Every structure is written in C-alpha cells, then in structure tokens.
C-alpha cells in the first residue's frame, strides 16, 4: 500500500496520476503548490491555461488546458462553401492570415482542379512572406516582452505598421485579409505596390541586425534563454513539432524547400537551423534545441523572407490576378490533404468533397496544437521564470490550437 | 418634435441664475479665506511655541481654502462642463495645496534660521511629504515620456496641454476615486497595513536625507544607517501585501522580493562602508561637505576602490528598488503584477509612491555619498563671498555652487538612468539574480572595501599616487558622463517623426 503523507486541498488528481511511485511512507515532503496560470495571463500567448505543479520556484509539471478559443471552425467548414470558408481560415493563425488563406485555397484548387495564373501565385507568395515577417515580428516582440524587455515589442510593431499599411492598400484589411481566395487573389495589387514594397525591404533589412544587437546578443537575454527548454531533434520529430521550433533543434526541414508548393521552387533562399554556440557571433552558451535557437531561427527567417520578397518583386509578371471558376464550384468526391509552411509550422488542410458545393469535411492541422504538445515533456524541473521563456520560444497562437 | 441634441447634453444643468450666484458665493468665501490667511500668518509670526505651530497649521488650512474657493469660482465662471469643474477643482487643491505647503515649509528655513525645534520638525515633515508627492507625480510622467521616446513613440501628450504634464494629476485623481477592493479571503487588516508599511519608511527616510547642509529634517549622526534601515523596512510591507492578497502569484512576488532585496543589502552595505571609511562618520552632512571642492574631490573619483564602490552601490540600489533588470517581484509577464496584483486605487498608488520615493532616495544617496552631494561641479570656494550676504546672493550661491537644487538635479539624473535601464534591458531570472549577488557583487565589494582599507593606511592624502589615482578616476567619470550626455543629445537631435504610412499616403487619389 502506498501511504500518503499530507493530503489536503493542494494535492489532487494530478498527484495521484503522476507520482504514485514517489511517495514513500515516513518521508518528509514539502508542500507542493498547484498554481493556475489562467486563461487570462500576460505571458501565455492567448487564452491558454496552464496548471503548474511547483515546489517553490521549481516547476515539477505543466499541464496545458486548451479549448478557450474553440470556435468550431471545422464544423463550419461542413456547412459553407469554400469561398465562404476563407474568412474562417483568416482567424486560425490570425497573425499570419495570408498563409492560412493560401493553404486552404491551394487545397481546394488541388481538389477541384482549378489553375492559378502566374501573377496570382507571385502575389500570393509576396503576401505570404510579408505576413511571415509580420508574424515573426510579433513573436519577437512578445518574446522580448515576456523576458521583461519592453522596448523591442514597440519596435516590432513599428515595422509591422509598414507591412500592415501595405496589406491595407492591397485588400483593405490589417489582420484578417481574406485576400487569397480560390483561383487567385481577390483584387490586383494597387499601383505603386512593388515600389513601396522595395522601399520597405530596404528600410527593414538593417533593422534585423539592430534587433540582434539590442536583444539577441544581450547577455541578460542570452542567460535567460540559452540552455533552457532544450528539445532534442528526436523528441521534436516524435512530438510532431514543425516550423521554427523544429528547425531550432537542428532539423533542416522546411516545406517551402523540401516539399515545394505554389512556386517556391523558383526562389533562392536558405533554411536557418539551430546551431551550437561559440562560432560566428553565436553566444557561447547556446545549445542546439534551446529557446534561444528557436528564437534566433525566426530572426534569420525574416532575413530569408526579405530575400524571397526581393526576388518576387523583380520577377513578378503582368497578367491575370484570378482565375475564378465559372458558376458554382462543385467539389469532386475525393479528398486532398495539403500542407503549407505557416508562421509556426506545417499548416495542413484536409478537404473532402462529395460532389456538392459544400465539402463533406474540412480538417485543419494546426501547427501550434502539435507544438504545444511538447510543453508537458519539456517543462519539467525548471524554474517558474523559464515557462514564459519556453512557451514564448515555441510561439503558440491559440487560434491555431483551438480552431 | 422634441429633439435632444449633444448641445443639450453638454449644457450645464444649473438654472440660469445659479451660476452667477455660485460664483459670487465662492469668490466671496475665497477672498475672506485669503484675508484670513494673511491675518493668521501675521499673528502666528508673533507667537512662539505651540501657538506658533497652531498658527502655521491654521494658515495653511486657510490658504488651501482660499485657493480652493477662488479656483472654483474662476472655473465655474469660465466653464460650463461640470466634469471640467471637478477636475480643475481637484487639480487646484492638489497642486495648490502641495505647492503652498512646500512654500510655507521651505521659506521659513531661508528666512528664520532660529526657530523652535518642534516647528522645524513639523515643517520638515510637511516639506518631505510635499516633495515626495510632487516628485512621484513628476517621476511617473517623466518615466512615461522617457519610455515613450525610447520606444519610438511620444508618451502622454494630451492631459494638461503641453506634453501631457498633468497626466500624473489625472491618474492620481482617478486612483483616488476608485473602488477600494478587498481580495476575497484575504486578510483584511494585513492587506490595509501592507500599503502603509511599505509607504511610511519610504517617506520616513526623507527625514534624515539632507538636501543641503542646513536643509535636513534631523541631521542624525547615524543618518546613513537610518536610511538604509528604512530601505529594508519596506520589504515587510511587500511581504504583508503578498500574503494578505490570498493569491499565489502575489506570494511568489513577495517571496522573490524579500529574497532579492535582503540579499542585495549586503553588497549595498559593503559599498557604503567605503565612503564611511573615508569620512570617518555616518553623518551624511559631513560626508557631503567633504566633497565641496569641485568635481574632482567627489568621493567616487578618489581612487579605483571608491569608483568600484560607487558602481556597485548603484547596481545594488537598482536591486533594492526592484527596478529592471531586477524587477522580478513585479514581473509583469509572469506574475501579472507580483505582490501588487490585488491592489487597486489608492493603495496601489501608495505602493507606487513608495517605489518612486525610494528611487529618488537611492539616487540622492548615491549623489551624497559618491557624487558631490549638493555641490555643483564648481568648487564652493569660488563662491565663498556669496555664501554670507543678502538673501539674493545666498540664493544665487545656492543655485550656482551648492544648494538643494543640485541634489535634486542629481537625484533626478540617477532616476533617469534607472528609467533608461528599465526600458532597455530584459529581466534577470531570480536564481541568476542571487548568483550575481553572491558570486559577483559580494566578492567585488569585499575586495573594494579591503583595498580601500589598505589605501587609507598606506597612501597619504597629498601624495603623487593619490593624485594620479584621482586624475584617472575623474577621467573615467568625465568620459562616462560625456557618453551619457552624448546619448541624450543624439536622441534629441535624431528625434524621429511618428511612423508615417508607406502605402496609403502616396497612393493616387489620397
């Protein structure tokens, strides 16, 4: 029989599941606290509830409770046409909405056999990469905010204002665009967009180095994030991590290079991965798979996105911006699963048609959902202050987790 | 049709003759109160002892009343919105009242050096409270402006007109009228006590903090220890607040704070011992007077040990004041607001006031101990002729050579550096904070103290070694100061405009 020492309001079912083997009769046990890092909290990105079991400042176990942002997106997909579902996709990863639109549009186009004009593909990639930069700026800013540096957040949002102005000129919206739709994009780029885009890229590229000087190589930040929340490549793949979280662990996998979709195979860019410290300006303490590397991969990715954008700006042809199918779009009775590289990882759309205009099933693989699953595994025997460091580096957006 | 427009809504709901009547009444009362103030002041200066004290207090009260009534009359006469009336009424009371108390407290110090001790004490208390209130309001506004500029935005701009200078007043008024919430299940008396226990020591240390040689509440001969002890007392208030909130996050903040502040008092004490050793006394006025010969005589620039002690003192006070990068106790991202989470309204304002008072006290203490106290960079001997002369000459001496304004300026300078650091650096984790304290700060301060003892023993005051060390450390100080000034000037000169829109503004048709 297992004898329990103190059984009171602070011990509960988590204990009985987790440490049934740990309690030994006669052993002195300090009180463990069960703390709720509730759905409303400045540093859980969105409405995420974390139950922490802590021993003082030492966190023994973290259990995420999700579902606070569940909006039945997939069920809605069974009731509306693909055109009507595009705005729903906006709200999944609301920080990188263009990429969501692009993923769903590509899936439906593959299912229904709709061809996309070349200019439309270029416009899509411009929007997707701009949105990737914007999304990474938010991630960078809020990560710095979690670490207590208030200023980079404002700098990130300052740059983001330029990007959002570009989006607003193209489609009228700043966050949920519904711009990329079935067959292409809903409107052509406005006059002067490419010039403005190039202006922005010239302005923005040196900023990334500035932010590295301000934050990435700052000794306090380095001490807070290096060697914290180390995820090995094996664990990362086992838990289904994708995106910068996976690349931070040293795995060179990016859908845009490895399984190119749309016209990504026409562009030259690199895939940054996590590296160990000591060389090339990387802080000595950095370990492959730690929080710093996951964060730094995002900074590098912004540079690569700038590269892609410059090539797009040069190569974009004139032409049609949309090939909208005539009449009602009937989805053939088969299924298509297509993944794109979202801001946080592989965003997958499964669309099953059955001959009608409305799909039978729309399933969304949210990358943040899978990324979050590693929280319990990696947040063991860490300090309380490390939780924002780890979760911020994994960078979950609850819209994707809960859908 | 009965239409009710916005004009109707905004129009005052007073009857047509109520306004002039109210104005007449208030103006009359105000004039009476003003006359009464003058009479009471006259009477009070004729009395001694208790009568004098009573007279002074009555004068202050009538002055407040006069200001209030006249101000209210003016506002009602010129404004139709009741809301604006209330705001300006409160603003007038706040500003006028505090200003009046400070004036009444400080001017006698200039005019009457001889007066009964109890009166002096009362005036010192009033002056301290007034100064802390005004400084906290100023510092909050200043912090928000500096933070805004660092973050590429403007900060408060609207309230009060010029750069939102009345923002603190408006915030203070808002906090004052907020509902006094008690956390459910919290310990009510401890919850209330915590705010006061945190606030009173922060205020109390101003009794012993000298603003100049004669401008000190009580020139304690253990003044330095008293002030450091007051710093430590504030910890109890924070602990009480964290416990009484019945909130695990507040407990975390309180525990972290206790841990951090108490630990950093050790390097603080060690670095304090260095100027104490040089001066041979704990009396702050003596330590201040030692540095009256120009900025090269400032204790920080005497030898490398004192320079190190000055730097470690500044870092240790950063940790004691719970300011970034050591602001784990109020770590917004993890603990919402740490021990202050459950506090709202005026109680929170008390904690905030205590924090800003401590920041200024830390800066002023650094100035007194290391950076020339109330003396300007010019040697006081150059202005010796002015030190004893008519009032205007003495005032000029105070402004140019040594006076309380210089101490206030230096305190504000160090507060500015603290603000600057807060908005630039990330937060250090608690175990790293403790690691830094025990493994870096403590050995450094101990070695500095030890080296200083040997320096005192072996190096004579006028010898070449002392002179060379003095020159080198002064050079370091001057370079650092010029660096800071260059940074500030760079920021002023390269003030960026607000973010303009790239895409919208030049589109055809816009």
Image (cartoon, rainbow, N blue to C red):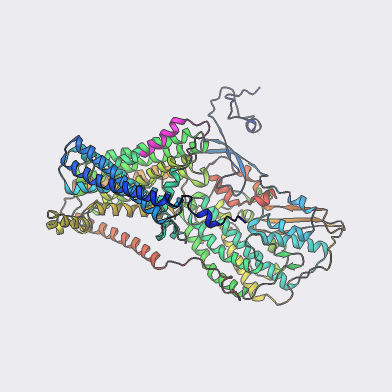
Residue B471 in percent (x, y) is at 23, 59
Q: Is residue B150 left or right of residue A133?
A: left
Q: Does any portion of residue A332 appear in the rendered image?
A: yes
Q: Nearer the viewer, residue A245 or B150?
A: B150
Instruction: Name the foreground residue: B479 vs A269.
Output: B479
Q: Is B194 part of what is drawn in magenta?
A: yes
Q: Quadrant of residue B126?
A: top left
Residue A282 visible? The answer is no
Task: Name the residue located 65 percent from the left edge and 31 percent from the top edge.
Answer: A13
- Location of the N terminus of chain A by quadrant is top right
Question: Which range is magenta?
Answer: B179-199
Image position, residue B84 (x, y; %): 44, 52
Instruction: Name which residue lies at 58% across and 53% down.
Output: A288
Q: Is residue B83 magenta?
A: no
Number of on-image labels: 0
The vertical placement of A133 against B326, above or below, is below
Coordinates of residue A182 in the picture (x, y in percent) = 76, 64
Q: Is residue B52 left or right of residue B173?
A: left
Q: Image quadrant of residue B281?
A: top left
A160 relative to A359 in the view: left or right: left
Horizontally, residue A303 falls left or right of residue A222, namely right
Q: Is residue A308 above or below residue B102?
A: below
Question: What residue is rendered at 68% in x and 54% in y?
Answer: A92
The image shows residue B68 at horizontal and vertical percentages of 34, 47
Q: Nearer the viewer, residue A89 or A338?
A: A89
């Amino acid at each position: 029989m297992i004898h329990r020492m103190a059984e009171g309001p602070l011990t509960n079912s988590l204990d009985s599941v987790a440490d049934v083997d740990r309690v030994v009769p006669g052993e002195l046990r300090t009180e463990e606290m069960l703390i709720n890092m509730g759905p409303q909290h400045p540093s859980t990105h969105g409405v995420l509830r974390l139950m922490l079991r802590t021993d003082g400042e030492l966190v023994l176990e973290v259990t995420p409770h999700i579902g606070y942002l569940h909006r039945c997106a997939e069920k809605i997909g069974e009731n509306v046409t693909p055109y009507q579902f595009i705005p729903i996709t906006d709200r999944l990863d609301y920080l990188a909405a263009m990429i969501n639109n692009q993923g769903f549009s590509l899936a439906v186009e593959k299912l229904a056999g709709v061809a996309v004009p070349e200019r439309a593909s270029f416009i899509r990639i411009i929007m997707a990469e701009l949105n990737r930069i914007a999304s990474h700026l938010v991630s960078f800013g809020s990560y710095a905010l979690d670490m207590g540096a208030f200023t980079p957040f404002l700098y990130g949002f300052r740059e983001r204002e330029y990007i959002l102005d570009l989006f607003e000129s193209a489609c009228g919206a700043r966050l949920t665009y519904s711009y990329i739709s079935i067959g292409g994009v809903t409107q052509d780029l406005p006059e002067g967009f490419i010039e403005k885009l190039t202006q922005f890229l010239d302005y923005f590229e040196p900023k990334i180095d500035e932010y590295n000087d301000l934050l990435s190589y700052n000794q306090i930040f380095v001490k807070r994030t290096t060697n914290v929340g180390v995820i090995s490549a094996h664990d990362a793949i086992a838990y289904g991590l994708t995106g910068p979280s996976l690349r931070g662990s040293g795995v060179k996998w990016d859908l845009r290079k490895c399984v190119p979709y749309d016209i990504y195979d026409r562009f030259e860019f690199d895939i940054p991965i996590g590296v160990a410290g000591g060389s090339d300006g990387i802080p000595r303490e950095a370990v492959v798979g730690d929080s710093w590397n996951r964060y730094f991969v995002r900074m590098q990715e912004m540079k690569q996105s700038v590269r892609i954008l410059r090539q797009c700006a040069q190569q974009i042809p004139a032409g049609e911006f949309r090939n909208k199918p005539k009449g009602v779009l009937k989805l053939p009775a088969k299924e298509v699963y297509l993944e794109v590289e979202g801001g946080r990882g592989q965003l997958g759309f499964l669309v099953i048609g059955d001959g009608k205009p409305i799909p039978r099933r729309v399933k969304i693989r949210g990358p943040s959902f899978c990324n979050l699953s590693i929280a319990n595994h990696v947040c063991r025997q860490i300090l309380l202050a490390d939780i924002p460091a780890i979760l911020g580096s994994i960078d979950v957006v609850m819209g994707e987790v809960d859908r | 049709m009965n239409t009710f427009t916005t004009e109707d809504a905004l129009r005052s709901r007073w009857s047509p003759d109520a306004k002039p009547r109210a104005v007449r009444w208030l103006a009359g009362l105000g004039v009476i109160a003003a006359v009464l103030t003058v009479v009471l002041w006259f009477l009070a200066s004729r009395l001694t002892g208790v009568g004098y004290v009573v007279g002074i207090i009555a004068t202050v009260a009538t002055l407040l009343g006069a200001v209030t009534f006249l101000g209210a009359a003016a506002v009602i006469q010129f404004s139709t919105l009741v809301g604006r009336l209330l705001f300006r009424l409160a603003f007038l009371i706040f500003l006028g009242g505090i200003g009046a108390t400070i004036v009444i407290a400080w001017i006698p110090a200039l005019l009457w050096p001889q007066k009964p001790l109890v009166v002096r004490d009362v005036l010192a208390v009033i002056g301290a409270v007034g100064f802390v209130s005004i400084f906290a309001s100023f510092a909050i506004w200043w912090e928000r402006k500096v933070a805004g500029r660092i973050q590429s935005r403007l900060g408060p701009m609207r309230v009060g007109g010029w750069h939102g200078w009345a923002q603190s007043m408006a915030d203070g008024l808002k906090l004052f009228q907020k509902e006094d919430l008690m956390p459910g299940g919290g310990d009510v008396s401890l919850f209330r006590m915590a705010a006061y226990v945190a606030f009173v020591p922060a205020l109390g240390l101003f009794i012993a903090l000298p603003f100049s040689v004669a401008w000190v509440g009580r020139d304690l001969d253990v003044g330095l220890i008293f002030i450091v002890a007051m710093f430590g007392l504030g910890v109890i208030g924070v602990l009480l607040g964290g416990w009484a909130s019945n909130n695990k996050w507040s407990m975390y903040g309180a525990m972290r704070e206790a841990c951090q502040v108490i630990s950093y008092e050790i390097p603080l004490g060690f670095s304090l011992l260095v100027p104490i050793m040089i001066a041979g006394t704990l009396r702050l006025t003596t330590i201040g007077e030692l540095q009256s010969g120009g900025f090269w005589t400032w204790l920080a620039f005497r030898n490398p040990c004192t320079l190190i002690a000055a730097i470690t003192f500044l870092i240790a006070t950063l940790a004691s004041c719970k300011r970034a990068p050591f602001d784990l106790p109020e770590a917004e991202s993890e603990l919402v607001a740490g021990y202050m989470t459950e506090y709202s309204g005026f109680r929170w304002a008390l904690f905030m006031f205590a924090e800003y008072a401590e920041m200024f006290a830390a800066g002023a203490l650094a100035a007194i101990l290391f950076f020339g106290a109330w003396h300007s960079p010019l040697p006081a001997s150059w202005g010796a002729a002015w030190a004893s002369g008519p009032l205007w000459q003495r005032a000029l001496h105070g402004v140019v050579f040594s006076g309380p304004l210089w101490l206030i300026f230096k305190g504000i300078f160090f507060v500015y550096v603290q603000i600057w650091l807060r908005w630039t650096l990330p937060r250090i984790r608690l175990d790293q904070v403790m690691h830094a304290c025990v493994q870096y700060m403590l050995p450094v301060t101990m070695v500095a103290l030890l080296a200083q003892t040997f320096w005192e023993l072996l190096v004579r005051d006028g010898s070449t070694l002392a002179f060379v060390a003095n020159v080198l450390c002064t050079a370091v100080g001057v370079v650092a100061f010029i660096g800071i000034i260059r940074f500030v000037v760079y920021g002023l000169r390269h003030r960026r405009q607000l973010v303009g829109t790239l895409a919208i503004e030049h589109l055809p048709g816009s």
